[in-house]
Amino acid sequence: MENSEIRRLSEAVIRFSGDSGDGMQLAGTLFSDTSALAGNGISTFPDYPAEIRAPQGTVAGVSGFQINFGSRKVLHPGDLCDVLVAMNPAALKANKGRLKKGAAIIIDSGSITEENLKRACFETDDPIAELGLEEYNVVAPDITAMTQAALADSGLDRKSIVKCKNMFALGICFYLFDRSDEHTESFLRSKFAKKNPAVAEANVKALRAGYDYAANTHAFANTYDVAAAPLEKGVYRSISGNVATAWGFCAASEKSGRPLFCGSYPITPATVILEELAKRKDLGVKTVQAEDEIAGICTAIGAAYAGNMAVTTTSGPGLSLKSEALGLAVMAELPLVVVDVQRGGPSTGLPTKTEQSDLMQALYGRNGECPVVVVAASSPADCFHYAFMAAKIAMEHVTPVILLSDGFIANGSEAWRIPSMADYPAIVPPVVKEAPEGGYMPYARDERMVRGWAFAGVKGLEHRIGGLEKDALRGTISHDARNHSIMVRTRAEKVARIADELPVQEIFGESEGDLLVVGWGGTRGHLRAAVEAMQREGKRVSHTHFNYINPLPRNTAEVFKGFKKIVVCELNEGQFASYLRQNFGQYTFEQYGKCEGQPFTVAELCDRFNSLLD
């Protein structure tokens, strides 16, 4: 590179931002994939508008994609940007508060028109001055015009040409961070080769034009060098949480020997799990796109009765609709995994924004005494492991399990070391293949309180199924008061005993100190980064993160006892904190919640922790 200065960074953050139709998600994904191939640790945050078609050029319609990549394992997508790519004035305004001191801003000057300024509610014709961005390294190429010039002989119409401007912007970023365009060119040609090769070549040409512009104009104060991370040896790929969840189920199906069935209704942000599973017919996966949420879970319950590893996927509103049928699965004691990819609520709420506000619904949102296992994943790659473990628990204990994810980790991605299936435990469902001497008793149980899993249609294993209370042994319908009391307690004890098989709850840091930070689910990366920052300052702060919510690990109370203060951090108004108070009243739990449709930032967490220490 022939630039004035190369800044060497251990981590760097880029945010691509523009209208929904500007291709920011694609540009961000291609940059993150390229960085993963270069050996960097990565964490991404796709940030979509909450409206399906928000007005173009408005702040509400801004779509973003943020990537944090580094020379070590990256825990979160970053608080502030080193480089902001803004494709219009609205994107500039929306991201003013996301910039590091001295950050580079790339703004398409061709988008700074009277109409766009009006839509973004600017009062002057100079958005840079109005926002007070003069101290940043602002570079304002006319990306739209230069893309049109580069593709003048492409044979494409003007609209198709302008759509390539995201690749021009990506080319600039490839130059700034010394990234190869080989993977992106291969992707573009593969994506468009059959349908429209001219579009593929136009995008490749725009990408190269952006790179050449950055290399030849020397408009940037510096370029950046982010070395590869010393990751554990293995085969890696970039993976999103939803895809990882789907693959975890496929792995569990293979380990258990039970065919995988998914019955679901499409709902943001969970739909990709169904879409990914639908691609796996080669692995014997069966999928049904049901007409509604209730039909989705009911088909899955039927599949479980027939001997399938059964899954249904949804988000918060859909979990509400599935609650009655989930109670049926509890009463019938059938293995089922319900995935809830949480989003901002209530009602339709913020469909594309993240939240952790379905915890109480997962724990208690059914009629009657209706306990289910609740498990939560903590990162995009983590979704593979906890999908596998949720399926293992469901099948081995013949019980429903709710797997909680959220929009942040479901849509985000990170570098994932592809595991060997030999490293994963066996899954051995208690399948009943023939009636024992004396006849089949469908609710006879083993020492774990688990009944056998008998499939429909097997001679000698005929038994009643349905939502009415069952006799505690024979499975016939029973309205006996004492029998009902026994069955209520039996179902609860069956879930509680699963704690005997869970891993112990671990502490990151010392087991005694001034402050214990408690989290669950998808907040782990930000919490861990904040705690690491405080530990480097010599502060006695530790972190524990929960993935098994119901039942909790057996040593949970022991984890809390060594700390002067405990703070529970979650993207809601204190649901897990309330749950812990309910179970461990001997401890005082401070709480720190956020309901903005956005993940935590490390900076705000550190501020909160310091205030508690003070």
Image (cartoon, rainbow, N blue to C red):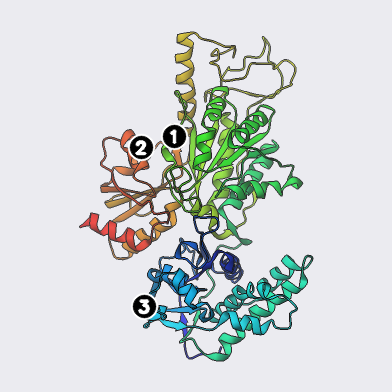
The residue singled out by tag 2 in the image is 579
Label 3, label 2: how far apart the Cα atoms are: 47 Å
Disc 1 marks a residue whose amino acid type is: Leu
Q: Which mark is residue 210?
A: none
Disc 2 marks a residue whose amino acid type is: Tyr
Quadrant in which the C terminus is drawn: bottom left
Farthest-out residue, right: 194
Q: Secondary structure at mark 1?
A: helix
Q: Residue at x 63, y 43 (%)?
A: 249
The residue singled out by tag 1 in the image is 363
Q: Does the CB distance between marks 1 and 2 fall below 8 Å? A: yes
Q: Residue at x 55, y 15 (%)?
A: 470
The residue singled out by tag 3 in the image is 130
Task: Looking at the image, tell me whether mark 1 or mark 2 is earlier in sequence order.
Answer: 1
Task: Looking at the image, tell me whether mark 3 or mark 2 is earlier in sequence order.
Answer: 3
Q: For residue 337, which quarter of the picture?
A: top right
Residue 535 visible in the current orientation: no
Above or below, 300 against 254 in this view is above
Residue 55 percent across, percent down from the top left:
51, 62
Nearer to us in this view, 198 or 466: 198
Label 3, label 1: how far apart the Cα atoms are: 49 Å
Above or below, 587 against 508 in this view is above
